[in-house]
Amino acid sequence: AAGIALLQLSPKGFEALDLAPQFAFEFFDAQAHTVEWVVPGSVVVEGGAQVSLLVSNLARGLTAADLSVMVGALPASILQLSQTGALAEVRILAPPQGDSGVFEVRLSTTAGAMSASNLTYVSRPMPKLYQISPAEGPARGGWPMFLKV
């Protein structure tokens, strides 16, 4: 079973067990959930963008109240949890960050399971591509293209 156990080493001939070194060891469930993708992969530092965490092996029967998401040191609001087959989507509201950079996204359950991925914060919005014209061209290249951003 998953959890933390205290291990105590007792070398041969070591009489005083209370003086033997102790170590914490964490056991984890091999089927623990994994954050597979974070979509979109980048948001602006002001936060407020909806972000989807696509998660595999999330325990069935959990609700949004059973989850917590941290982005860096800040909690993210969980907007929705939906499970379809082997994947679950946890939709969050990205919290604001003080600076641009890559921040760890940690998804935890009330049972103690945790997994992580990354989310990039940028100081200005990434441009959106609305149209490519023409939509096709020769494989050899050399064809003019127009991008509408």
Image (cartoon, rainbow, N blue to C red):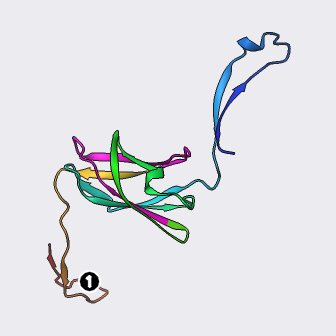
Query: In this rendering, would 110 be left or right of 117?
Result: right
At 19% from the left and 49% from the top, the residue drawn is 46
41 to 73, vertically: above or below = below
The percent position of residue 6, horizontal first and vertical second, equals 68, 28
At 78% from the left and 19% from the top, the residue drawn is 10
The percent position of residue 25, horizontal first and vertical second, equals 65, 33
57 to 4, vertically: above or below = below
Rendering quarter of residue 49: bottom left
The percent position of residue 47, horizontal first and vertical second, equals 23, 51
Quadrant location of the C terminus? bottom left
Query: In this rendering, would 100 be left or right of 105?
Result: left
Q: As rendered, which of 121 and 114 lies closer to the eye?
A: 114
Mark 1 crowd level (few <14, some 14–19, many ≥20, 10 Å Cα)? few
At 51% from the left and 67% from the top, the residue drawn is 87
State the residue position of label 1.
Answer: 141
Circle 1 sits in a helix, a strand or a loop, which is it? loop
Residue range highlighted in magenta: 88-116
Rendering quarter of residue 148: bottom left
